[in-house]
Amino acid sequence: MLSPAAVAAHPHIFIDTGLTIVLNDQGEVTGVEVVWAYDALYSMLTFEDMGLDNDYDGRLDEAELGFLNGFDMNWVEGYEGDLFLEAAGDRIALGPPEPRGLIVEEARIVTTHFRPVVAPVSADGLIVRAYDPTFYTAYDLTRGVRAEGACAVQVTPADLDAAYTLVEEMLYAMPSADLEDAFPEVGEAFADTVVVRCTG
């Protein structure tokens, strides 16, 4: 049985994520290409909300794909795209998303976009995490992480036991009446950590 805190921290959307760290000829990061593969339930609900896939076969025609394309790129002010880069302890500023396509794969919506960095930084030692601070959406790096050039990535999975312990400690410290409107931002604790290492 899950504790009330663990249940409260359960995400509602699950996204299989792929990341490609893009470098220039000087070995600097210029941006990250991001693939989001939405879970089947969320994809189905999106089709229904938008009046798509009326034959319920999990496939869209070209007109429907065109209508759906970009549906997840209308970001509200302040939304950071659930992607966070860090170098030498400093947060790396990212520019707005550049859409790079959408497909439907086994009845799941898969979108690709590019996040440019505002100013290129050295790739060696770069830390990358994909997470929703509120943990409403869960990101899993199952579609792989890679870096271009003479760089490799090391992925350290999140310590889930520690993450759920943190959730319980934070929730039990809050008045129950505040939970719905002020759920603590615990998403980072559930995020895998990607570190880029380069040679040459």
Image: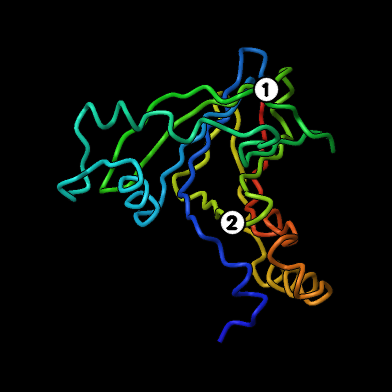
- In front: 162, or 82? 82
* Distance in Å between CA atoms under marks 1 and 2: 25 Å
Q: Residue at x 22, y 37 (%)?
A: 60
- In front: 175, or 12? 175
Q: Residue at x 32, y 28 (%)?
A: 67
Q: Quadrant of the N terminus?
A: bottom right
Report the side of 133 relative to 37 (left or right): right
**Residue 150, placed above or below residue 193:** above
Type of residue at label 1? Val
Kindly state the secondary structure of the residue where label 1 is placed: strand
In front: label 1 or label 2:
2
Q: Position of residue 187 (x, y in %)?
A: 67, 56
Q: Residue at x 67, y 32 (%)?
A: 77
Q: Position of residue 68 (x, y in %)?
A: 35, 33
- In front: 185, or 118? 185
Badge 1 is on which residue? 117
- In front: 114, or 50? 50
Badge 2 is on which residue? 136
User: Which of disc 2 and disc 1 is earlier in sequence?
Assistant: 1
* Residue 149 badge: none
Q: Position of residue 23 (x, y in %)?
A: 60, 21
Q: Position of residue 137 (x, y in %)?
A: 55, 53
